[in-house]
Image: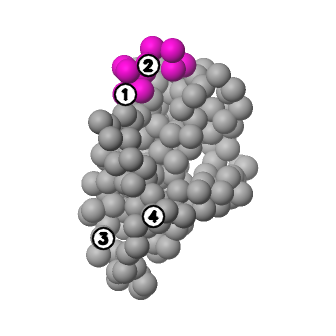
Amino acid sequence: MKQLYTLFALLLFALTSAAQSTDWKTKEDYLRDTAEVAKTIKWLEQNPFPDEYSERKKKAQYAFKWLEGAPYTVTLDATFLQAILEDKKFAYKDMMVPQFAFGKGLYLIEHNGAKNEYEANLRGVQSMVMLYKKIKAKDSRAKNKLLEKMEKAADQNELAAYVREQMR
């Protein structure tokens, strides 16, 4: 399975360069803020176009900063991202890749760092699908074949099987 470590590192650098300062130094510091990070990730899933876009950017920076040093490791699987990244016409890929990472991070938060890559990928894909639906509700031109396939699987309650098949 291909990992997108370089892409993740670049995204982290780009999104955390202006992130708010935090006092996270120890594992306990990170764990103390898991509820706030989870709340932030859920907000990001639901708000692709807030009234003040800078609010989305700040929240994404906060979540990425937390993921960067958290005791949980989030890896990106190209299987779920490559076709999105290669789609030159899809204007929202810069939102989808981080959302996949946020979704995986949310799974780790909610399951105390459980090392179940399938479940983490499933939550990452679910997070992208939620955001994709919100984007399409505002911009009917926002279409991506892979995300359409994921959305269809989710709507038919087959997303878990889809993710499992992709991981083979």
Q: Are marks 3 and 1 in contact (CB under 8 Å)?
A: no
Residues at marks 3 and 1, CA–CA distance in whole angstroms: 27 Å
Q: Are marks 4 and 3 in contact (CB under 8 Å)?
A: no
Q: Are marks 1 and 2 in contact (CB under 8 Å)?
A: no
34 and 2: which is toward the camera: 34
Label 1: how many Cα within 10 Å (few below 14, some 14–19, many 20+) = some
Instruction: Provide the secondary structure element on which disc 4 rests.
Output: loop
123 and 40: which is toward the camera: 40
Q: Position of residue 166 (x, y in %)?
A: 62, 36
Residue wearing tag 4 = 19
Badge 3 amino acid: Asp
Badge 4 amino acid: Ala
- Asked if the stretch drawn in magenta spans residue 134, the answer is yes
144 and 73: which is toward the camera: 144
Badge 1 amino acid: Lys
| Residue 73 as seen in the image, left or right of residue 32 | right
Residue wearing tag 1 = 134
Residue wearing tag 2 = 139
Q: What colour scheme governs how the chains and residues are painted in the rendered image of this protein? A: one colour
Residue range highlighted in magenta: 133-143
Q: Earlier in the sequence, mark 4 or mark 3?
A: 4
| Residue 34 as seen in the image, left or right of residue 115 | left
Residue wearing tag 3 = 33
